[in-house]
Amino acid sequence: MARQIVLLRGINLRAARRIGMADLRELLESDGYEDVRTHLQSGNVLLSSPLSPRRLEAAVERSLAERFGLDVRVLVRTRAELAKVVERDPLGAVAKDGSRYLVSFLSQRLPAKVARGLESAEVAPERLVVDGREIYSWHPHGQQRSPLRKLMRDDLLGVTSTARNWNTVTKLLELAGG
């Protein structure tokens, strides 16, 4: 069975969308997934499953809706895909604080026009690279007032996204093992 990283979008940000990690692990184990492990409280799960990433996304979304009554978008990357995300690291030379360096995982590639618009946005000193189904973004002054983050809303991107900081991305890869 393949080791996969399951990223839940938008949970535990406000009271109405709370899911305890112990409850989440219990749900996924009862669904038959193996080696289920969560990281932090923000919806990062590692598990083993024979399902393809797309089928796993749909199955976990259904389970979350049935068990918790929440419509939660789920994005999945295999361990190999996550390793490539870390290998690419296009902003590593400038992004020196892993808590301000983000990877936004996308449900699919951005439309070319959207990607070009993002890459040409004048947001210095922030930086951005679109690469496949990920957007790497550097926010040296944080995200709270970031003009770049305002351009990266799902309604503007036209796809579902969920972001994790570089520290979390590299930790998830480490936890996924070899």
Image (spheres, helix red, strand yellow):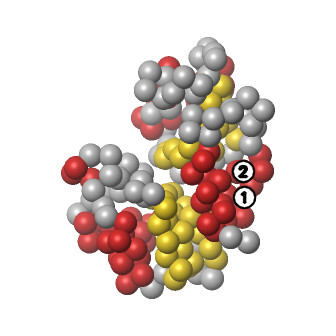
Rendered image: mark on residue 67: none
* Residue 3 location (% of width, % of height): 62, 73
Query: Looking at the image, is 114 positioned above or below residue 173?
Result: above
Query: Label 2: how many residues lie within 10 Å, few (<14), some (14-19) or many (20+)?
Result: some
Report helix, strand or loop for mark 2. helix
- Residue at image x 27%, y 56%? 18
* Residue 177 location (% of width, % of height): 68, 70
- Picture quarter with the N terminus: bottom right
Front residue of this view, candidates 173 and 66: 173
User: What whole-number distance in Å separates the C-alpha atoms at marks 1 and 2?
Assistant: 5 Å
Residue 151 in view (yes/no)? no
Query: Label 1: how many residues lie within 10 Å, few (<14), some (14-19) or many (20+)?
Result: some
* Residue 132 location (% of width, % of height): 69, 45
Residue 166 in view (yes/no)? yes
Q: Quadrant of residue 29?
A: bottom left
Query: Looking at the image, is 107 positioned above or below residue 147?
Result: below
Callouts 1 and 2 close, C-beta under 8 Å: yes
Report helix, strand or loop for mark 1. helix
* Residue 173 location (% of width, % of height): 65, 61
- Residue at image x 43%, y 26%? 144
Amino acid type indicated by mark 1? Ala
Front residue of this view, candidates 42 and 67: 42
- Residue at image x 58%, y 27%? 139
Q: Residue furthest front?
A: 97
Q: Is residue 92 left or right of residue 98?
A: right
Rendered image: mark on residue 83: 1
What residue sits right under mark 2 in the picture?
Answer: 86
Amino acid type indicated by mark 2? Val
- Picture quarter with the C terminus: bottom right
